[in-house]
Image (cartoon, rainbow, N blue to C red):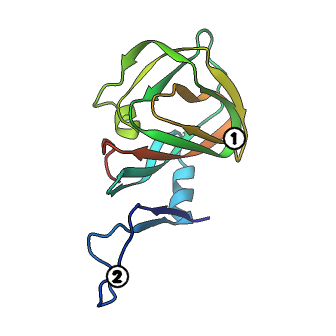
Amino acid sequence: MFLLFATSGLALLPASGSAQDDAPRTTVISPEALAELLRQEGGDNPLRVIASPDGQFGVFILSSEPRPAPEGAVTGGSHSAVGEIYHVVNGTGVFVTGGVLENPSEVESGSARYTRAGPGENGTIRDAQLVEYAPGSIFIVPPGVPHNATWEVRSRTDFLIYRFDPDNTLPLH
């Protein structure tokens, strides 16, 4: 499987037949690069983040070992400007989405979460949906929607996350 990232815009060829230097380009991610990140022990790690005229686009791997749902209130976060698409590569569990963040706290600008997903808030989520996932499940999470992808992890889970950052807050990788 190859992942293909095409930046927006039309690349025109000048009379000489070579592409313009400043034209958007396609980034190809090899199966080997993807497999290497899938062997990681956990975390939310960038595979690639590229710039385009419309903002930055990134592919990340979020991996988690099995763990039960926490006791008590449902918690999670939201991103102010970054939209995400979560694709379950393998694993099963429960994804929390929707609802309202109560007593939110801002994500610190120097934190790992900020550099992975941009500015946002964390907190308790009231009226959240708990959605079971399995390989092939896809979650489209617009900016501002509270969520927690790893609320309950029943078997080792790897998500491919596609992030869309119109404000260019994610570091290029």
Q: In the image, what residue type sits under mark 1?
A: Gly
Could you say which is closer to the camera, residue 156 or residue 94? 94
Mark nearer the N terminus (1 vs 2):
2
From where the camera sits, is residue 154 visible? no
CA gap, disc 1 to disc 2? 44 Å
Closer to the camera in the image, 148 or 13: 13
Location of residue 109 in the rendering, given as x and y in whole percent from the top left corner: 28, 29
Q: Position of residue 154 (x, y in %)?
A: 71, 31
On the image, numbered disc 1 is attached to which residue? 91
Q: Quadrant of the C terminus?
A: bottom left
Closer to the camera: disc 1 or disc 2?
2
Name the residue at 26% across, 69% down: 22
Vertical comparison of 79 with 29: above or below = above
What residue is rendered at 41% in x and 61% in y?
7
The quadrant of the picture occupied by the N terminus is bottom right
Residue 105's image quarter? top left
Q: Residues within 10 Å of mark 2 (few under 14, many from 20)?
A: few
Is residue 110 among what the camera can see?
yes
Classify mark 1: helix, strand or loop.
strand
User: Identity of the amino acid at label 2?
Assistant: Leu
Q: How many marks?
A: 2
Residue plotted at (57% across, 58% down): 35
Mark 1–mark 2 CB contact (< 8 Å)? no
Residue at x-position 58% and y-position 10%: 73
Q: Position of residue 95 (x, y in %)?
A: 64, 30
Provide the secondary structure element on which disc 2 rests: loop
Q: Nearer the viewer, residue 87 or 43?
A: 87
Residue on which disc 2 sits: 13
Quadrant in the rendering for residue 52: bottom left
Label at residue 105: none
